[in-house]
């Protein structure tokens, strides 16, 4: 299924890799944490090599007068770009180990961490709002569909989930803009429409949140439906029905609590995806978050920004996957700690 | 997404004459305008679209940065509203020695920084020396300052890692302050255009104590990081212009407020809000709801505005002082042929480009744009659209259609460049039967290809004036600029000598004649294929009064040269 | 990407005759799935469109997608131009129809790269196991740790914007899923009696993989590829939207959205039509993929 981000699949596959005996949780956690070190190292190495292989230098001007050779040389000295690549790489690793991501090339002498921190609130605003929408809507859709299996409600919910899971968020975004943004504006003579650029705690949030939430909602709804259906078939639920317990109690205590366990572990990767934002949604809606900052950085050959964003994203994804795996082990004692 | 035609942001701009005068004539007269709105409504919202990379005027090298920077910092001189000459700004008067080598600027005694301290000559000496510090690697120093000021010629050769070498270089510069209100600059050779150089916004005074207090004390001249500490957020920036930076919301807007200490009196506007709306559609939407006072429209929105009864009255085309052309790589054996070049040039109907860009790219066949001293439409006769002549030139070149069709047109990956070049190749196909393909490259891959001469034809290449003097244009096509700005390196017999002579010619008449001759050589040999002069379609709310527009302004912010007199009328 | 969930090892000890039965069964099951048939039909139509567009153009039934009409920019729909003209006065419907060519080509060619890398790594790791498996899987893990769109963007900026670099970049980033699935399947297959038997009679690893293992993982591989095609089409559209995709004037849906978005106020359907085309294509491939999975995965047999 097409999606804008990898994290969901990431953790998802890891679930399958890990299975078996319980115990040795501490060693398991330690090993997983240590494993992150080489992963992040190689991510830095590969991105470093690729970023420097890309044609063009950070000092190139779009057009007009270019910097003179002497000025370029002096800039290279200032930013350490005159040194051999391996030396630059070692210096970089050393700095990253001290949480120093260097200075941006594009924004004169601003620290990369400062720029990322300036952009992250926008990404977070979008992500957290979306998360608050995804959890209740996704679960509600899934539970309702499962409880009324094969009813009209189920079909509508399933159709909705299929659309959300299939149509890429960027196409959804464009269509939303055309219908609820431009279309509504033209139809109402500019009186009633949804803005589609920028971000703030107002109506500007609506369209990007819908666009970014469609896939995760569909995913949560499908997962909830499937796991609810499975629980409903369990003996103890049938027993509970047989005992004549009130429906509310059966559904609430026996079905939902158990059905939500796999859903909760799936929310981790979704959360990671929302934390790191979506490059394309931020670009479409002109949101100055870290996703669109990355696109700008690639175009400007701002190596420190490219590297730091990639490292940050990889780290968040890896960390969330780790937490999910640990959670999974804790919740499900059957998982093997290998 | 920007529509600019040849890439991202360009540099400063240019001269005045016909077009500029015409524009000035359109301005409402400053004295008797409509009644001003109450102070609380004196807010002007403009949209330079992009956040400045820095608040240090010396490091601001793009025109959108200058648009914001020159509101907060004031150089010695500024361009006159009609762009025919410079006028006093931070300097109250100036004089040039008879040998043309010494410029003496008398500063205003009542000029003050935004914190109330007086602006003194030492601030200019410090600002200029800072600009010329090789370790700062400012983008605008070379060639304007290092090739004019005495002792600065070795700028590029100083060891930027050695504090003593830098200090020795800076101490040897022809910059001095004989008294607190006199600033003297000695030049290496007579430079008739130097008055324009000191009016560039990068040539601003800088306060040493401000720089050092942000850096946490004095630092060696090699420490470029500390040198910039003061310019990273609005709060630590102290300027001498009519406005002060007051608040930056990353990715959203920058707010400027009046500098109550400004010598010319605080501006009427209580707030100048520079928005960073990259999406042109959103800009237009905000303009329609009145939350944006001035906005630039791109092709599709120009069409939309022109068909809208209200917007069409508020919109107007503003010229930019620059031309755009096709560059032919003359290292290519086919393109070294003059007939082939002229065939390619004469087969392009420039009015089609104008149509494809909603009228914003106005046909031009000369190097010097309309509105600049030295513009003469007659000089472009040999590049006129003429299919029959183009066919004859193609035949005379001796190359077959199949051979010429192997050439590629290098295209920057911007909407504007793509649009224009798709039109150009389709005209070559229609008029000459050529099947020339586009070679589209992301912006940052284009420059390495150009400087390594790894291209056939490149376009639209172009230039927008840094200041209104032809010198700024003619040095592009000298052989010294080959592979630097002169990507095609055309062979132009006599051009270099004429330009060198004109650049330091203090006689205005003979200087103009020399530049004319040089331009004729360039145009007639098809050294480049001149296509159009860019105009910008901007919409301005009816309540914005006394906007001083000129072709020196940033393409997105008409009136950015000075908001001193601008105000909001009752509405 | 979530396709893997359903792709559990298939029961593999089937002889040749049983395999024929399997494919026949699969077809029967597939035919009963209405959505899959619809999806398959739409995919067929798209393929047909991609092949027929040049023919229709030659017959003057649709306009030349590159022909410009600079005086009628953004002309609205008319009989001769059912979807109107674009920013350069080119026929939008014709460009949309030709756009299917590039999308399908990308979708299919990228799968070629993915199959090449994913299959060889997955089969090698799964069949040989042990250290080789460990090494290859750790390599896969590192690759997997990259945020994918970021990675594609960096790759494209390294390779430069061209069709070839788009294929390569999307392919290089997306093989991991297939490699993991293939490895898992191979790992379980190599313990089966028929593979043990082949090994006992001295068959070479290459022969065992190609004759005994590969045929048995073909189903899941086909399903993964079917889901991979829309993923690749989507990624191309995103890259083109960001302005680093297929170079113009070649019509590509992503580029059309990119260019059309500039005119969203003036002519919203400039971006709308290609967006709808992408949405329909994605749905069609997903329905087809779902159908194929249900048909080819015996676990679903009830």
Image: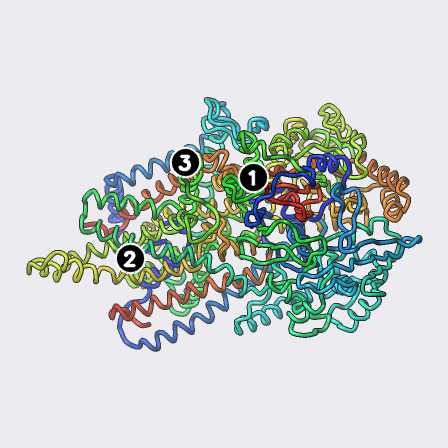
In the image shown, does C165 or B427 lie closer to the viewer?
A: B427
Left/right placement of residue B470 relative to residue C151 reads right
Which numbered marker is on residue C9? 2
Figure quadrant of residue B167: bottom right
Which numbered marker is on residue C248? 1
In the image shown, does A191 or A228 lie closer to the viewer?
A: A191
Relative to residue B105, is residue B214 depicted above or below? below
Figure quadrant of residue A180: top left
Left/right placement of residue C12 relative to residue B290 reads left
Q: Nearer the viewer, mark 2 or mark 1?
A: 1
- Mark before the other along the chain sequence, 1 or 3: 3
For label 3, the residue is C47
In the image shown, does C176 or A209 lie closer to the viewer?
A: A209
Chain identity of mark 2: C
Figure quadrant of residue B332: top right
- For the residues labelled 2 and 3, the Cα–Cα distance comes to 31 Å
């Amino acid at each position: 299924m097409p999606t804008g981000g990898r994290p969901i699949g990431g953790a998802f596959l890891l679930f399958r890799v890990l299975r078996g005996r319980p115990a040795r949780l501490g060693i398991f956690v330690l090993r997983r944490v240590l494993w992150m070190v080489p992963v992040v190292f190689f991510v830095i190495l590969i991105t470093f090599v690729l970023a420097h292989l890309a044609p063009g230098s950070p000092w190139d001007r779009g057009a007009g007068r270019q910097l003179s050779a002497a000025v370029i040389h002096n800039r290279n000295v200032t930013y350490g770009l005159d040194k051999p690549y391996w030396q630059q790489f070692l210096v970089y690793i050393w700095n990253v180990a001290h949480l120093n991501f260097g200075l941006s090339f594009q924004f004169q002498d601003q620290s990369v961490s400062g720029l990322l921190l300036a952009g992250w609130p926008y990404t977070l605003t979008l992500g957290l709002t979306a998360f608050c929408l995804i959890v209740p809507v996704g679960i509600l859709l899934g539970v309702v569909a499962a409880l009324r299996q094969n009813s009209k409600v189920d079909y509508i919910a399933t159709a909705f989930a299929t659309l959300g899971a299939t149509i890429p968020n960027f196409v959804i975004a464009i269509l939303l803009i055309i219908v609820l943004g431009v279309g509504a504006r033209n139809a109402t003579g500019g009186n009633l429409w949804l803005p589609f650029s920028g971000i703030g705690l107002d109506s500007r949030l609506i369209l990007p949140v819908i666009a970014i939430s469609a896939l995760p909602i569909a995913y949560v709804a499908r997962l909830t439906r499937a796991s609810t259906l499975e629980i409903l078939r369990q003996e103890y639920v049938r027993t509970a029905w047989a005992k004549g317990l009130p429906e509310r109690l059966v559904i609430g205590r026996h079905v939902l609590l158990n059905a939500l366990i796999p859903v909760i572990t799936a929310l981790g990767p979704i959360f990671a995806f929302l934390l790191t934002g979506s490059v394309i949604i931020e670009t479409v809606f002109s949101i100055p978050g870290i996703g669109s900052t990355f696109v700008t950085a690639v175009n400007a050959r701002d190596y420190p920004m490219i590297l730091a964003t990639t490292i940050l994203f990889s780290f968040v994804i890896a960390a969330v996957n780790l937490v999910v795996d640990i959670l999974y082990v804790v919740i499900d004692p059957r998982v093997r700690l290998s | 997404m920007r529509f600019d035609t040849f890439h991202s942001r360009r540099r400063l701009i240019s001269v005045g004459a016909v077009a500029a005068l015409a524009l000035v004539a359109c301005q409402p007269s400053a004295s008797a305008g409509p009644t001003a709105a109450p102070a609380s409504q004196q807010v002007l919202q403009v949209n330079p679209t992009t956040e400045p990379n820095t608040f240090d005027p010396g490091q601001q090298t793009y025109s959108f940065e200058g648009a914001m920077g020159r509101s907060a910092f004031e150089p010695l001189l500024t361009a006159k509203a009609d762009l025919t000459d410079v006028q006093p700004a931070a300097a109250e008067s100036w004089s040039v020695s008879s040998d043309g080598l010494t410029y003496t600027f008398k500063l205003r005694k009542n000029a003050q920084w935004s914190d109330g301290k007086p602006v003194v000559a030492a601030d200019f000496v410090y600002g200029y020396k800072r600009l010329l510090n090789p370790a700062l690697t400012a983008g605008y120093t070379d060639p304007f300052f290092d090739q004019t000021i005495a002792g600065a010629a070795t700028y590029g050769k100083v060891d930027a890692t050695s504090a003593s070498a830098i200090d020795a270089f800076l101490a040897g510069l022809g910059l001095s302050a004989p008294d607190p209100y006199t600033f003297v600059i000695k030049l290496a050779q007579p430079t008739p255009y130097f008055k324009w150089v000191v009016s560039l916004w990068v040539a601003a005074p800088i306060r040493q104590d401000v720089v050092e207090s942000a850096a946490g004390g004095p630092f060696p001249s090699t420490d470029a990081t500390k040198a910039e500490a003061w310019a990273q957020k609005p709060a630590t920036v102290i300027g001498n212009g009519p406005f002060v930076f007051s608040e930056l919301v990353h990715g959203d807007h920058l707010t400027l407020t009046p500098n109550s200490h400004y010598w010319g009196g605080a501006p009427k506007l209580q707030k100048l809000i520079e928005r960073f709306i990259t999406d042109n559609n959103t800009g237009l939407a905000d303009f329609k709801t009145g939350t944006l006072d001035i906005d630039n429209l791109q092709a599709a929105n120009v069409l939309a505005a022109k068909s809208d009864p209200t917007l069409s009255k508020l919109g107007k085309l503003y010229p930019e002082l620059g031309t755009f052309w096709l560059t032919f790589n003359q290292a290519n054996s086919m393109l070294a042929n003059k007939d082939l070049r002229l065939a390619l040039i004469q087969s392009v109907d420039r009015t089609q480009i104008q149509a494809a860009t909603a009228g914003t790219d106005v046909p031009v066949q000369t190097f010097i744009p309309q509105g600049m001293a030295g513009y003469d439409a007659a000089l472009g006769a040999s590049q006129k659209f003429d299919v029959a002549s183009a066919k004859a030139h193609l035949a005379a070149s001796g190359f077959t259609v199949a051979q010429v069709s192997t050439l590629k047109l290098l295209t920057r990956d911007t909407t504007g460049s793509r649009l224009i070049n798709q039109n150009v190749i389709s005209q070559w196909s229609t008029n000459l039967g050529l099947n020339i393909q586009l070679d589209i490259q992301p912006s940052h891959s284009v420059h390495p290809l150009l400087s390594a001469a790894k291209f056939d034809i490149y376009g639209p290449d172009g230039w927008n004036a840094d200041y209104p003097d032809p010198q700024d244009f003619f040095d592009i096509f000298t052989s010294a600029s080959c592979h630097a700005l002169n990507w095609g390196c055309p062979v132009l017999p006599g051009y270099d000598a004429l330009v060198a002579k004109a650049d330091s010619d203090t006689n205005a008449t003979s200087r103009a004649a020399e530049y004319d001759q040089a331009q004729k050589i360039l145009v007639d040999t098809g050294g480049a294929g001149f296509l159009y002069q860019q105009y910008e379609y901007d919409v301005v709310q009816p309540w914005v009064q006394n906007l001083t527009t000129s072709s020196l302004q940033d393409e997105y912010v008409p009136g950015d040269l000075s908001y001193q007199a601008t105000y909001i009328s009752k509405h | 990407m979530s396709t893997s969930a359903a792709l559990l090892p298939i029961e593999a000890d089937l002889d040749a005759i049983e395999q024929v039965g399997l494919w026949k069964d699969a077809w029967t099951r597939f035919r009963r799935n209405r959505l899959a048939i619809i999806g398959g039909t739409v995919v067929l139509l798209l393929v047909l469109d991609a092949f027929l567009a040049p023919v229709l153009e030659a017959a003057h039934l649709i306009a030349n997608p590159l022909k410009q009409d600079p005086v009628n920019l953004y002309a609205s729909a008319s009989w001769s131009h059912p979807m109107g003209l674009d920013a350069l006065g080119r026929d939008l419907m014709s460009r949309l129809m030709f756009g299917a060519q590039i999308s399908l080509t990308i979708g299919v060619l990228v799968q070629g790269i993915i199959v090449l890398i994913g299959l060889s790594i997955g089969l090698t790791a799964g069949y040989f196991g042990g250290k080789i498996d460990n090494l290859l899987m750790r390599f896969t893990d590192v690759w997997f740790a990259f945020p994918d769109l970021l990675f594609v963007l960096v790759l494209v900026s390294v390779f430069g914007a061209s069709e070839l670099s788009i294929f390569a970049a999307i392919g290089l980033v997306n093989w991991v899923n297939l490699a993991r699935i293939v490895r898992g399947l191979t790992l379980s297959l190599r313990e089966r009696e028929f593979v043990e038997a082949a090994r006992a009679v001295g068959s070479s690893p290459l022969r065992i993989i190609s004759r005994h293992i590969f045929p048995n993982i073909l189903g899941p591989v086909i399903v993964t590829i079917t889901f991979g095609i829309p993923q690749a089409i989507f990624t191309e559209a995103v890259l083109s939207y960001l302005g680093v995709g297929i170079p113009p004037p070649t019509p590509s849906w992503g580029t059309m959205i990119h260019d059309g978005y500039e005119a969203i106020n003036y002519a919203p359907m400039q971006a709308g039509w290609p967006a709808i085309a992408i949405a329909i294509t994605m749905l069609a491939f997903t329905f087809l993929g779902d159908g194929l999975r249900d048909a080819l995965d015996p676990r679903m047999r009830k």
